Amino acid sequence: MIYSKNTIKNISESIGIPKLKDGITTAMAQDVEYRLHEIIAEAMKFMRHSKRTKLTVSDINSALRVRNVEPIYGFETGRPIKFHKATAGLEDIYYVDDEQIGLDTLLEEPLPSMPLDTVYTAHWLAIEGVQPRIQQNPIPIDEESGDAAAKKPAKIQRQDGVETIPLVKHVLSKELQLYYECITESLQSSDPVVKSTALESISIDAGIHQLVTYFVQYVAVTVKNNLHNLEVLKTTMAVARAIRRNPNLFIEPYMHQLIPSLLTCLVSKQLCENYTEDHWSLRDGAAEQISEICQQFGQTYHTLQARIARTLLRAFLDPTKALTTHYGAIVGLTKLSTNIIQVLVLPNIKTYMSLLDVEMEKDNPQLIHDGQHCRDALLNALRVLAKSYNDLEPVNLTHIQKNKLADMVGNTLAGIVYADPEGGKIMAAVAAASKETNNQSA
C-alpha cells in the first residue's frame, strides 16, 4: 500500500480525531490511494494533450478542476522542485528545501516600477449605424485588403468634420447584380412569356439566397409606388408567391416585411383606376398567401394568426371603411380558418348586413357593384363553414327556418341562402356554429 494507515492516523489526530480504529484507517487509506490514482491518470491525459513527457503541477490542478476539487495552491513554480529526505523514527519524511536569501541581498535589489494608473477614455463606436474613422475604432476590412480604392464605401462628411463610413456593407457579386437587374426588367415587360420565365426562375433557382432581401424590398417598394396599377400589383404578388414557394430559400426572417405588402393588396381601398376592373382576384390571391404563411409559420410564431385576424376584424367592422376593404377583410378571415369564421365573422354578419343594405340602396353603381361582391364573400364564408360540418343533415328550408336564419345573418343574406342549392347545409351549419359559440360564451 502506497498510502499507509499511520498517515491517516497522524492526519486525524492533527484535526482533533484521536484513536481512530485500524479498520477505518485501512479503508480510508485504500480510498485515498484509489483517488490519487484517479487524479494522476487524469493529469497524465492533460500532459499527453499538451505534448509533454513530464507531469507538472498545472496538470494536477487541471485534473482536480475536472473532478470538481479545489486545486492545490502554493506549488506553482517555474523551476523544478527538489525534495530532501529526513529520517524520523520508523518513517521517512520528504520535504522541499527552501532557498535561503540573505537580507542584505534582498535590500540591495532595485525597487519594482510603479504600476500605471487606470485611465478610462470614451469614444463613439458607431453614430446612427455608421462607424467614425477615428484611431480607437478598427480599420475597415476593405482598407486592409490592399484594394481599398475599388472596394472602399463612399465617405460621409458630417457637420462636425468627422468622416464616417457604413458600419455593415452587403456586397453582391457582379453575377447576382446582373441577375437581379435582368429579373426586375423582365417583370416589367409586356410580354407574358418573358414575365412568366422570370417568375419561374425566382421560384426554382437555388443560387439567389443573397437576393431574398432585395426581392422582398422590391415587393414593398413596388406595392407602395403602384397602388392603383392593377397589372403591376398582380405581378408583384406573383413575385411574393414565387419567393415563398422556392424550396431552396430560407424566407422566415423576411415574413414580417412581406406581410404588410400582402395586407395592403388585400384591404386597400382602391387598387385600380376603374372599379369594374378585376381587382377582386388580386385580393383573393393576397388572402390565399396570408393563409399559407399562417399555416407555414403558425407553429413557430403562435400569435401570427391572431394578430392578422385582429387587423382584418377591425377593417371588417369599421363602417367608415370602403366596401372594397370590407371585401378583403371578409375574404382574409375566411381563408384563415373555419374557427375564425365561426368566432369572428358569423356573430357580426347580421349587424354588417344592415349597414351593407343601407349602402346598396344608394343610387351609386360602384356601391352596388362592390356590395354585391361583399354579399358573395359572406355567402362563400358560410359555404366554407358548412363544409366543416359534413356530419350534419341538411335542414329542410321552410318559412320558419328562413326567419330563424334571418335572426342570425339578416334578412337579405337569409334570402340568398334560402335560394342557394346548398341552403339546407348552410342553415344546419350556421345553427350548429351559433349554438357552440353561445355555449362557449356562457
Image (cartoon, rainbow, N blue to C red):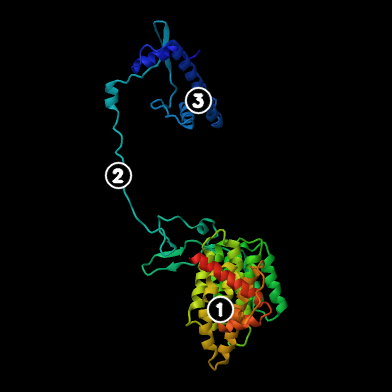
Q: Is residue 236 above or below residue 274?
A: above
Q: Is residue 79 above or below residue 327?
A: above
* Rendered image: mark on residue 409: 1
- Helix, strand or loop under label 3: helix
Nearest the camera: 372 or 76? 372
| Tag 2: amino acid | Asp
Rendering quarter of residue 25: top left
Gap in Å between the C-alphas at discs 1 and 2? Answer: 81 Å
Q: Position of residue 300 (x, y in %)?
A: 55, 58
| Residue 22 appears in the rendering | yes
Q: Position of residue 38 (x, y in %)?
A: 52, 24
* Rendered image: mark on residue 392: none
* Rendered image: mark on residue 39: 3
Gap in Å between the C-alphas at discs 3 and 2? Answer: 42 Å
- Helix, strand or loop under label 2: loop
Q: Position of residue 204 (x, y in %)?
A: 69, 65
| Tag 3: amino acid | Ile
Gap in Å between the C-alphas at discs 1 and 3? Answer: 81 Å
* Rendered image: mark on residue 117: 2
Nearest the camera: 357 or 241? 357
Q: Is residue 99 above or below residue 45?
A: above
